[in-house]
């Protein structure tokens, strides 16, 4: 590295190194290839935090405590669907240098664009409600302070992390990566502390089953907490200008790295979700199946598994809430700018998205209930970006040589139909129209 390169910021040095890797310059060998892979890692890591946010804590806790290992297959299926759509979103940004919101504004009728924007804003508020409350709840329990104080502290911490984006994309990627690594490590520790029936866990992960009518509602909740609208929008924005690709050869190389990153990052997120269900099952299913709240789970872990397990649980919740709140704010800002061309200062956006959480707490709504209700709101918005993404990535005039293959289109359409049908079931059950 030259002296001039050393004087550049971390993001600029990363961009230069990516350009060298795409051009085939640099050292050869296994170490060099590993270093190149790390250069391209970042967008999927940031997007993956949406798949281990506090909404997942709430649904996975309920699934494991009430139904044991039997709903693990839902977690696995949701993660596979997530990989498909995050891969398509990343491809859209790499190929077009525009994000999904921008592409939608350019190619869909104006009434459709405004409807998509409105639903996306509702989804952003519901998402941030879950993420912000999760971080605040973790701080409240960890520091033994009122929830409202935890919310204020969470707002300060997330704003400080968002300020790192002023130095470019790389510092924020590393911070979020460290936080999701903390969540993953926490659940490795939790699995070491709880007794696990691994044969039953493998059976639950591979064999679809619904043990009772209530299981369907929980299963749909898992899907709603896993496949997230804002993550679909965000991923295309994270890849649209990150790496210099001036021709199709470079784009193909970028796509190979991107697809590998999606598989690795979302596999880790999926394993964390699996671990959440397994921990809840091992700790609560046998004698405490009625546990459905995060606060109750935390307080029950100390007598069941020890103070260490409870502390690790809180640290993971805190890391999840803070990192996902950061990512949610980024996504909301990107959606607004893409659909209507308005960019708000990150501090203003952070304040606006905090308001619903403060209102919920002021009204006395239970925090875990609020997390679960937010997933119902997301069910209305989720099919919109999924359908839009399938449409635009299947159009040759937009994607050129990178248009979806027939097989990919069929898989994406089928997944969208499944999600849409299950979300209708969730909404109907929430409204008391079916049991």
Image (spheres, helix red, strand yellow):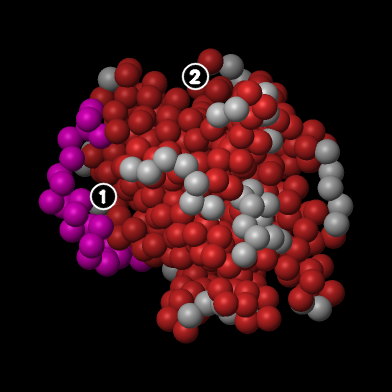
- Please give left or right for residue 371 compared with residue 199 in the image: right
Numbered label attached to residue 142: 2
Residue at image coords 55%, 29%: 1
Counting from the top left corner in percent of width and height, residue 334 is at: 73, 51
Residue nearest the viewer, comparing 427 with 136? 136
Task: Please give the range of residues in magenta.
Answer: 191-214
* First of labels 1, 2 by sequence position: 1
Residue at image coords 25%, 57%: 205
Q: Secondary structure at mark 2?
A: helix
Circle 1 crowding by C-alpha within 10 Å: few under 14, some 14–19, many from 20: many
Is residue 200 found inside the magenta-colored segment of the image?
A: yes
Counting from the top left corner in percent of width and height, residue 240 is at: 66, 56
Q: Quadrant of residue 120?
A: bottom right
The residue indicated by pointer 1 is 68
Counting from the top left corner in percent of width and height, residue 243 is at: 61, 50
On screen, residue 108 above or below 130: below
Q: Secondary structure at mark 1?
A: loop
Residue at image coords 78%, 37%: 346
Question: Quarter holding the C terminus?
Answer: bottom left
């Amino acid at each position: 590295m030259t002296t001039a390169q050393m004087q550049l910021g971390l993001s600029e040095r990363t961009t230069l190194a990516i350009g060298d890797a795409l051009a085939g310059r640099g050292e050869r060998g296994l170490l060099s290839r590993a270093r190149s892979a790390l250069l391209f890692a970042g967008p999927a890591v940031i997007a993956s935090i949406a798949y281990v946010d506090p909404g997942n804590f709430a649904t996975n806790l309920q699934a494991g405590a009430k139904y044991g290992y039997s709903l693990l297959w839902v977690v696995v299926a949701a993660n596979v669907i997530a990989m498909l759509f995050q891969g398509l979103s990343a491809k859209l940004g790499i190929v077009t240098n525009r994000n999904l919101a921008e592409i939608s504004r350019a190619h869909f009728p104006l009434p459709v664009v405004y409807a998509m924007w409105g639903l996306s804003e509702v989804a952003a508020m519901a998402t941030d409600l879950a993420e912000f409350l999760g971080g605040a709840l973790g701080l409240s329990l960890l520091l033994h302070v009122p929830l409202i104080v935890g919310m204020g502290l969470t707002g300060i911490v997330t704003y400080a992390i968002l300020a790192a984006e002023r130095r470019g994309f790389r510092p924020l990627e590393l911070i979020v990566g460290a936080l999701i690594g903390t969540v993953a490590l926490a659940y490795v520790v939790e699995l070491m502390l709880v007794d696990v029936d691994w044969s039953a866990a493998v059976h639950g992960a591979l064999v679809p089953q619904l043990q009772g009518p209530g299981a369907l509602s929980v299963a749909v909740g898992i899907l709603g907490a896993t496949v997230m609208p804002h993550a679909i929008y965000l991923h295309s924005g994270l890849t649209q200008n990150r790496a210099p690709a001036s021709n199709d050869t470079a784009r193909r190389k970028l796509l190979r790295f991107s697809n590998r990153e999606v598989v690795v990052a979302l596999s880790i997120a999926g394993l964390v979700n699996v671990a959440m269900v397994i921990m809840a099952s091992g700790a609560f299913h046998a004698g405490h199946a009625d546990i459905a709240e995060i606060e109750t789970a935390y307080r029950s872990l100390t007598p069941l598994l020890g103070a260490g397990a409870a502390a690790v649980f809180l640290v993971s919740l805190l890391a999840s809430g803070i990192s996902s709140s950061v990512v949610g704010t980024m996504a909301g800002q990107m959606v607004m700018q893409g659909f209507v061309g308005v960019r708000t200062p990150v501090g203003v956006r952070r304040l606006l998205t905090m308001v619903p959480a403060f209102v919920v707490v002021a009204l006395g709504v239970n925090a875990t209930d609020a997390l679960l209700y937010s997933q119902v709101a997301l069910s209305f918005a989720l099919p919109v970006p999924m359908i839009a993404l399938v449409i635009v990535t299947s159009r040759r005039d937009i994607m050129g040589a990178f248009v979806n293959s027939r097989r990919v289109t069929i898989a994406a359409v089928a997944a969208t139909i499944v999600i849409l049908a299950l979300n209708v079931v969730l909404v109907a059950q929430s409204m008391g129209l079916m049991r």
